[in-house]
Image (cartoon, coloured by chain):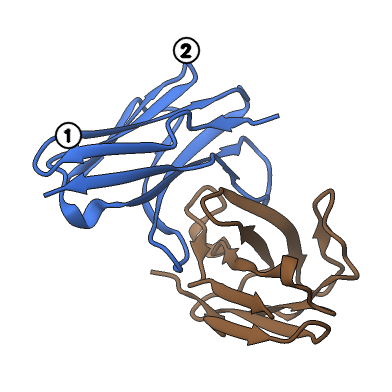
């Protein structure tokens, strides 16, 4: 049972345009959400997170939106750059779960075309 | 920020041999570390949770005798792939969370280890 779903395995975007990566979750106990970026043969690196008490968090070119009623979050990258080409993982964590691992989606491969 | 270092980054071994992968938290103490495996073009698959001073907790379907985890100190966890076979070839990644920064913060990942069994 996939609790965190990234339904688009890949996305291609023109350089300078907006990239929108989507993520849906099923567990209503999730209250903290994160996005990671991963290059081939490297570990994931943290990008941005959002707590369930917020609906938006912005950090430079990256903005994460959370729609709790729809159990949906999205990562917006604008403007997209070729260096943004990577696999993006959405992750979530349940409330009061102690030091338990994050639950990851399957990832979306973003290709930014120059 | 907190750093997790994984070693080696790449290893090639013969079938039947064992390989040890180290995961270190460099500037924080991690009572818990997590070991993941990633197959080509697939998501991160949690293998086990490594607990300092106690036995690791393995996910369903992961053989604990095959993937030995030792978390002997607050800064080091090791994963040993025993009697490796070609199907064990994969990308192994560890992560840890800095408890001082709070549990509701990002987990830091090691650089990953590419294991190839020939």
Instruction: Give the image quarter of residue B72.
Output: bottom right
Query: Please, is residue B104 above or below residue B114 in the view?
Result: above
Q: Among all residues in the image, which is located at the extreme right?
A: B65
Q: Is residue A60 visible?
A: no
Give residue B88's position: percent from left, percent from top.
Answer: 73, 68
* Disc 1 target residue: A18
Q: Is residue B95 visible?
A: yes
Q: What is the number of the mark on residue A69?
A: 2
Is A82 situated left or right of B52 in this image? left
Chain of the residue where label 1 is placed in the rendered structure: A
Residue density around tag 2, few if under 14, some if 14–19, many if 20 or more, within 10 Å: few
Give residue A53's position: percent from left, percent from top.
Answer: 43, 27
Q: Among all residues in the image, which is located at the extreme front?
A: B118
Say which element carries label 1: loop
Looking at the rendered structure, whether the residues under marks 1 and 2 are on a common chain is answered as yes
Chain letter for the brown part: B
Is A23 situated left or right of B13 in this image? left
Is A7 situated left or right of A63 in this image? right
Residue pictured at 64% horizontal, 60% vertical: B37
Badge count:
2
Say which element carries label 2: loop
Out of B94 and A33, give the one closest to the viewer.
B94
Chain A drawn colour: blue
Residue pictured at 40% horizontal, 27% vertical: A73
Residue pictured at 47% horizontal, 65% vertical: A43
Query: Please, is residue A47 above or below residue A79 in the view?
Result: below
Instruction: Give the image quarter of residue A3.
Output: top right
Are the residues at dot 1 and dot 2 in contact (C-beta closer than 8 Å)? Answer: no
Chain of the residue where label 2 is placed in the rendered structure: A
Query: Please, is residue A96 above or below residue A5 in the view?
Result: below
Work out whether mark 1 precedes mark 2 in sequence or the reverse, and give the earlier one: 1
């Amino acid at each position: 049972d996939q609790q965190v779903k990234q339904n688009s395995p890949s996305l291609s975007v023109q350089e300078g345009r907006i990239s929108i990566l989507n993520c849906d979750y099923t567990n209503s106990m999730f209250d903290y959400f994160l996005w990671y970026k991963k290059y081939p043969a490297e570990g994931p690196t943290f990008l941005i997170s959002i707590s369930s008490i917020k609906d938006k968090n912005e950090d430079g070119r990256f903005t994460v939106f959370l729609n709790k009623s729809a159990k949906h979050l999205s990562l917006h990258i604008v403007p997209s750059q070729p260096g943004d080409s990577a696999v993006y993982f959405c992750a979530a964590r349940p409330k009061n779960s102690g030091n338990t691992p994050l639950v990851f989606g399957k990832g979306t491969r973003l290709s930014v075309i120059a | 920020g907190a750093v997790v270092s994984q070693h080696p980054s790449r290893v090639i071994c013969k079938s039947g041999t064992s390989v040890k992968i180290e995961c270190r938290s460099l500037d924080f103490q991690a009572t818990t570390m997590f070991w993941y495996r990633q197959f080509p073009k697939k998501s991160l698959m949690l293998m086990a949770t490594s607990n300092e001073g106690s036995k690791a907790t393995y996910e369903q379907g992961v053989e604990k005798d095959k993937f030995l985890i030792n978390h002997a100190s607050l800064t080091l966890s090791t994963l040993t792939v025993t009697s490796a076979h070609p199907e064990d070839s994969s990308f192994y990644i560890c992560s840890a969370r800095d408890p001082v920064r709070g549990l509701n913060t990002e987990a830091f990942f090691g650089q990953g280890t590419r294991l190839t069994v020939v």
